[in-house]
Amino acid sequence: MTKIALISESKKRCEQLGIDPQGIPSFTNFYSEDELNVKRAEYEEILSVINFFVHKMLELMKGIPLLILISDENGCILEMAGDEAIKSVVQQSGIQVGLVFNEQEAGTNSINLVLDSRQPIQLVGAEHYYEFLGSSACYSVPFQYTDISNLLGTITIMTTIDQHNPFLLAMLCTVVDSIERELLLKKQNKRLHILNQVVIETTRNGIIITDRDGAVTEFNKFAEIITGSKKQDVINKPILDDKTNNFIKEVLHTGQDYEDMELVLRSQMGQDELVCLFDAFPIRDENMQIMGAFAQFRDITERYHTQKQINYLAYHDDLTGLPNRRFFTAHIEELLSCRVNENSIFAVMFLDLDSFKKINDTLGHNNGDILLKLVAERLKACCHAPNQLVSRMGGDEFTILLEEMTDHNEAIHVAEEIIQAFEKPFAVDGYEFYITASIGIAFYPQDGRNVEMLMKNADIALYRMKDDGKNNYTIFKPIPNSGIERLTLENSIRKALQLNEFVLYYQPKIDTLTGQIIGTEALVRWNHPTLGLIPPGKFIPIAEETGLIVPLGEWVLRTACSQNKIWKEKGYPPMSVSVNLSSRQFSKHNLVESIKEILLETRIDPQYLELEITESMTMNVEVAIEVLGRLKELGIQICIDDFGTGYSNLYYLKLFSIDRLKIDQSFVRDIMTDSNDANIVATIIAMAHNLGIDVIAEGVETKEQLDFLRSQGCHEVQGFYYHPPLPAEQIEQLLLKTLSMKPTSQR
């Protein structure tokens, strides 16, 4: 029966019993103290083996809240271990050592399902019958003596639902497999002692027996497989392997027992290395005199590699395969504790991808993950020396450790190499695009003598680089109160919206044929009462991080529409106003309704509102077509901002019903000195016109730039050659002035 069917049938039985899913169970079935003691004594060796593996697992999964429950074949809880917070919660509900789980009281639960079906089961959230267990995830696996298939009980992992991961059930199955193998080995060892080494050749352990002088007298086939030696080559001779031989000598000379000694053996038969647990003890005659030694190898290679894999996952990022934060910090702590002196220099570098959130929002998280893998490979290619370590902190943040440096220039060279490596495009899901990175660098010992201080200062340097324009590196420099300004801005943005501290400036758009103002672009500024006029580069990123960009964007849109309506009512010629949409606004499900309300509130004719979006917002083509289509139905104009710097292509522009392309100022700036930029601009203009799309160029600062654009058929521009962004009252003065002048084709 499938897991779904098992759960469904169980819930039906609970409903037929009249169990209230919203209640708390009243448990009545418990082992008495004597019964519990008897069962624990019976299971003493079993619990010892289980506890060994359970504590290993809890140690390796440290940091994840897990509670382990061990039950017998009747569903009685024999032991609980792990997270104390979870243990306290379940004990309050009556789940404790000695409780016998049964469906009549516990409802649908993983322990009874596993005991009934003898298969691994996971119950997550609402799959439990009782609603109070809806915030938990349980994973249960049966364990048994595999030689006779008699059910011994269950092992259960219980955690919070936000920690749910199918890997936990897979890991528990692997651990139980190792437990069953160990239980079977223990059982076999007992038989060997009881039967006085009978049926040596039938065991799967490697068996070696020697006489009192250490010469081999028995050497079974599994000993041959494990050691790589043939029986005929070792009989009546000392054991060839030095480690094994030393243990045997100690047993023969002192009578000491050895148990569970872990040995790594390399087979001489061309196989991979084997990991074994080695036991050795003396064989005594009837007078208790040592007459030889008994030794055995138990192959635990599979368990060993499982433990290595668990350990790897605990210290590595599962997406990129890079070391994770735990590994990185532990490595630096080891470096600081035993491998540095007063003359040592090493660097900690924090790297963060610029505008990665836009890519995640537009391409989707799966493609974002692909990009992170590509970034990881590129970083490893830049930092491949033995003294260089690349790790992933989480999200789009990476760290790099540079050891054994002779001077600071080595770190600077690596940072410049990384920045240069990011100049090559990344290819994801058929798109080829560019992404940049910002890097912060801190040096030992000048910027810190412990892990926390070094990482903190590298992080501070990183965010200073982001504030200074991104796509570069910066070295940490102590600046008093540097963090206070950022914190002040964060705490002040919400209040600034309430106190109307934000103001709009408007940059005129010019018809290149007439020189007349044909529209404006609304640009937000913050007139802070104590810090003065704050440029957008300082507060827009913070607003985007905190989500305040949404109410701020709505304020900009409402204010710009109102102002445009005022100019029209004063008798100035109708013209459009452009407003930039943020990626957060564009991804809001109520975007169109919100804009529609603002249009009705301000009573502006929709044809005079133009919304500027970036190319990255259109990467999810289906969503972009739907949203832009609904905006076009309102009569609004759509412009692609900074065209040529992102990820879109001209084919999709027709699908999006785009009215206008804005050529990014980075291309316009160098059109007179860089033939590539000139060719790009000319191509964009020609292809856009072929598609029936208008073009506007921003950042026009010289007459030569204007003449070039005009010659290529670009009839709309904005830039300091004509006017910088101006307050509304100064725009009004320009409009008033143009009314008294005749149109002219020259400035």
Image: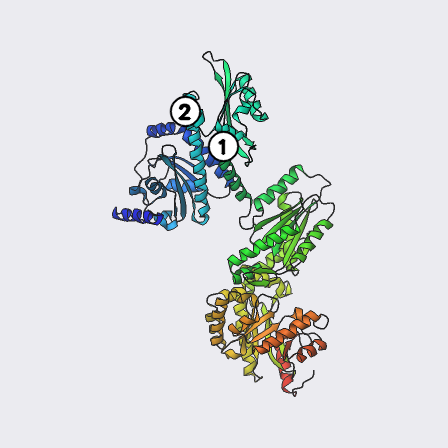
The label shown at residue 299 is 1
**Location of residue 452 in the rendering, given as x and y in whole percent from the top left corner:** 62, 45
The label shown at residue 191 is 2
Farthest front residue in view: 232
Residue 71, picture quadrant: top left
Looking at the image, is 9 positioned above or below residue 572? above
Question: In what element is the residue under mark 1?
Answer: strand
**Location of residue 724 in the rendering, given as x and y in whole percent from the top left corner:** 66, 74
Question: In what element is the residue under mark 2?
Answer: helix
**Location of residue 745 in the rendering, given as x and y in whole percent from the top left corner:** 67, 85
Amino acid type, callout 1: Asp
Out of 595 and 336, give the one closest to the viewer: 336
Left or right: 451 in relation to 149? right
**Location of residue 203 in the rendering, given as x and y in whole percent from the top left corner:** 44, 28
Image quadrant for the C terminus?
bottom right
Q: Is residue 350 visible?
A: no
